[in-house]
Amino acid sequence: MGYFLDLFLSGLTRGSIYALIALGYTMVYGIIQLINFAHGEIYMIGAFTALIVAGVLTIYGWNQMAIIFIASIVALLYSMGYGYTIEKIAYKPLRHAPRLSALISAIGMSLFLQNYVLLAQTSDFMLFPSLIPDFKFLTSFSHIARPSEFVIIISTAIVMVLLTFFIKFTKTGKAMRATAQDRQMAMLVGIDVNRVISITFIIGSATAALGGVLIASHIGQINFYMGFIAGIKAFVAAVLGGIGSMPGAVLGSLVLGWTESFFTGYVSSDYEDVFAFIFLVLILIFRPSGILGRSDTQKV
Amino acid sequence: MLRLRNIDAFYGKIQALHDVSMDVEHGEIITLIGANGAGKTTTLMCICGIVPPQSGEIYFMEKSIRNMNPHEIVSLGICQVPEGRRIFPFLTVTENLDMGAFLRSDTAEIKKDMDYIYSLFPILAERRHQSGGTLSGGEQQMLAISRAIMSRPRMLLMDEPSLGLAPLFVKQIFHIIRQINEENQTPIFLVEQNANMALKVAHRGYVMENGRIRLADTAANLLENEEIKKAYLGL
């Protein structure tokens, strides 16, 4: 039972990180029907930014709480800037081009950012300080999971609640939903669609960067390539849940996290990714629109 | 109030509008009739900035709106009820109405307008928490018009409001159109295939063929015009 719980929680932790990234994929897809392949890179850039800020602040002898707080905030803001800029230079000019053009632009952006970080930083793994403090109130649960796992799960839950509230009840949130459902009609009621698209990229980038900072702090090392695999996995999770659906992205992420965790725990850790993708194939065979996805006939 | 001057518009390489000039004055209902593909919807989309015209000018209240973004044009008070109703299918009825009032921030007045609409269309009040996509065609048309009213438009553009509706609903829709016009003197630009109904409710009419304005006259004269009778009224 203890082993099961271990696997359950580590799956939940993984799933949480996937969810933070998958939200960005699914929101952007919902609004402009684009798979933003550069999204994983935002997650990576978030981690690198936090590393640099944390390094500098450590030199100046700041205390740990201040460091994690400031490093996370800076990483989030910096990544939001990246998300905003990527959309403006790589996707907006292609808004009326065939969809494939924007997709290729996204892949190009992804490669560009990876190589930029590779050149600006290093190709080696870099140690990441465990920024998340060992909170006293969590150490009593340390036989179940590490405090950083709890922090990841709880932060993700808070982000989900805030985001749900934002999308459901605020004016901007409603405008985002309206734009996703019928972009031209959204323009006709006076919604500045370009602004909505920018906001979507900014929010998605922020949650991805948060995921990057959290996972880096949990695992303790980062490199320029980390966004690629995580990004693909989160994309899988988003498709699994039904791309375009936000609850679907979260659910798909958790399902993927648990699948990976239980398979590696009970079967073999060598085939972790294989299981994940077999699972994806099976879901897509039996439910092509994903777990919570709407089929196209319903959408129109 | 609204003036179109020598508009040319293209979809890709295909020219959809040729030298279109029209006027809509304060307080009047004008109708634009014509066959499928004549360019009626394109004309509306040009006014709203969705399909920017290649050449020509569009003035609203003496101000050129030709190079404005759609949301800026809406903020001047031009509101369109597009063809096919275009209800946001997964927003509730109330949220759809909220979207109509997107550019307004006078919360109390918005609330008042919403209550007014719910008293006008009790069926919408009954379904206020239902998502828009689950309404019937007629209910969706009511919602589409209501959403437009929520913006307190200075001018209303309507594209085929009677399309696909049962005859009883069609009558009701035209009644509402007249009512909106009479109550606030809101000018209405009505695009219709149902030329008979449209000419009966409108003050003036334009006839469009292949992207060109063929005829412009008072609605009464157009109803009597032999050519129009044959081509559009089926008499």
Image (cartoon, coloured by chain):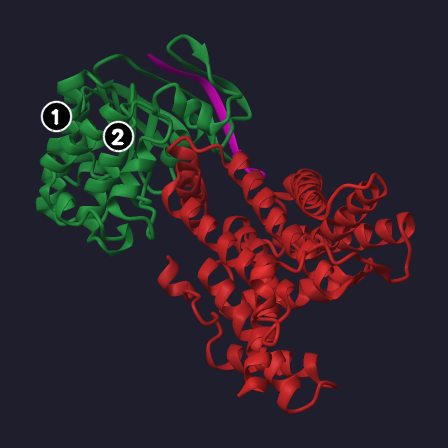
Residue B169 point in image, percent of width and height = 12, 44
What color does chain A have in the rendering?
Answer: red
Which span of residues is magenta-colored? B1-14
Where is residue B180? Give x, y as percent: 17, 25
Residue type, numbered disc 1? Gln
Q: Residue at horizontal 71%, vertical 39%?
A: A89
Left or right side of A124 for B36:
left
| Foreground: disc 2 or disc 1 | 2
Q: Colour of chain B?
A: green
Q: Is residue A155 above or below residue A280?
A: above
Q: Is residue A261 left or right of residue A90?
A: left
- Quadrant in which residue A133 is drawn: bottom right
Please indicate, yes or no, whether residue B210 appears anywhere in the rendered image: no
Residue B6 sits inside the magenta stretch: yes
Q: How many circles with numbers are drawn on the protein?
A: 2
**Do marks 2 and 1 share a chain?**
yes
Choose between B215 and A203: the one closer to the eye.
Answer: A203
Q: Which residue is mark 1?
A: B179
Residue A227 found in image quarter: bottom right
The chain containing the residue under callout 1 comes to B
Seen at 18% across and 19% down, the residue is B203
Q: Is residue B24 left or right of residue A46?
A: left
